[in-house]
Amino acid sequence: MADPSPHNQPFPPFIELLSVDSTNNYARGLVHAGMAQHGTAVFAHEQTAGRGQKGRVWEAGQNMDILLTVILKPLPGQVWQAFKMSAGIALATADFFSKYAGDETKIKWPNDIYWQDRKAGGILIENIVSQPLPVKGGISPVNENRDWTLAGIGININQVKFPENLSNPVSLKQITGKYFDPLELARELAALVTARFETLDAADDLHERYNQLLYKKGQQVKLKKGNRVFEARIDGVSAEGQLQVFTSIPESLDSGEVEWQLQP
């Protein structure tokens, strides 16, 4: 009998768009229309209303960036393992970028790709989680077969000029001096992300590898939590995805409650 795993689907679609508001929005529409399968990738040559972490806008012109969303099918229970999924996607993206940019590629917690002290890309992960539905006599159980993960990835490829409001950006062209085809790179990245996602449960070194690539690990940085700006040493990231720092005492910080205060 064939393996019914949603990960055993050959040749997932790769959708190429000339322009779109957001590849994540387009991918979400595919899921809701029942047209998605594990590994489906959505690539756009231009994006007009892309979003990054905390709702930041990510706009891009023609053939300048990788603008990509990979639709992934979590196995039962995986959608609740947020850091494991996030770390796997970030590691696949960092491994891809370092192939071209070298081993100065790092992961800035939680989901940015940095080269030296400059931002090369970002990742926005969104989960579509099934909800219990009202039925006669009560509510239906949650159907985990309807859970999906959208891995939205933006990477600077061919830019040499950036908007002034961006802090310390860098592109692959600036690093290497070479022009790249974003479409071909996006195909490669989509395959890497999908393959890494399929091995999450077997990846015993996932947490260790993430910490090995952690940006500013062992260094003093400025962070902001609420109205408090403070210096802290970056010690690592916990298995639950909290940033572990040391001020005068060890502290664990959640994503979303703290901001980096990096110097331009």
Image (spheres, rainbow, N blue to C red):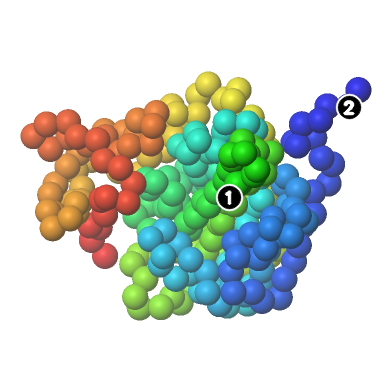
Q: Which residue is mark 1?
A: 128
Using the image, determine if residue 207 lies above or below residue 193. above
**Relative to residue 65, is residue 231 drawn left or right?**
left
Kindly state the secondary structure of the residue where label 2 is placed.
Answer: loop
Give percent across and percent down for residue 240.
39, 32
The residue located at (72%, 45%) in the rendering is 38
Observer-side mark, 1 or 2, equals: 1
Q: Which residue is mark 2?
A: 2
Q: Earlier in the sequence, mark 1 or mark 2?
A: 2
Q: Is residue 262 left or right of residue 203?
A: left
When asked about the image quadrant of residue 242, the answer is top left
Amino acid on which disc 2 is placed: Ala
Identified at 64% across, 74% down, the residue is 20
User: Residue lying furthest front in this view?
Assistant: 137
Residue at screen point 84% across, 41% down? 10
Residue at (14% x, 47% y) in the render:
231
Quadrant in which the N terminus is drawn: top right
| Type of amino acid at the residue the image marks with label 1 | Ile
The answer to whether residue 147 shows anywhere in this view is no
Query: Left or right: 209 with respect to 158?
Result: left
Classify 10 Å Cα crowding around label 2: few (below 14), some (14-19), many (20 and above). few
Distance from label 1 to label 2 (Cα)?
A: 27 Å
Please say if 159 is above or below 219. below
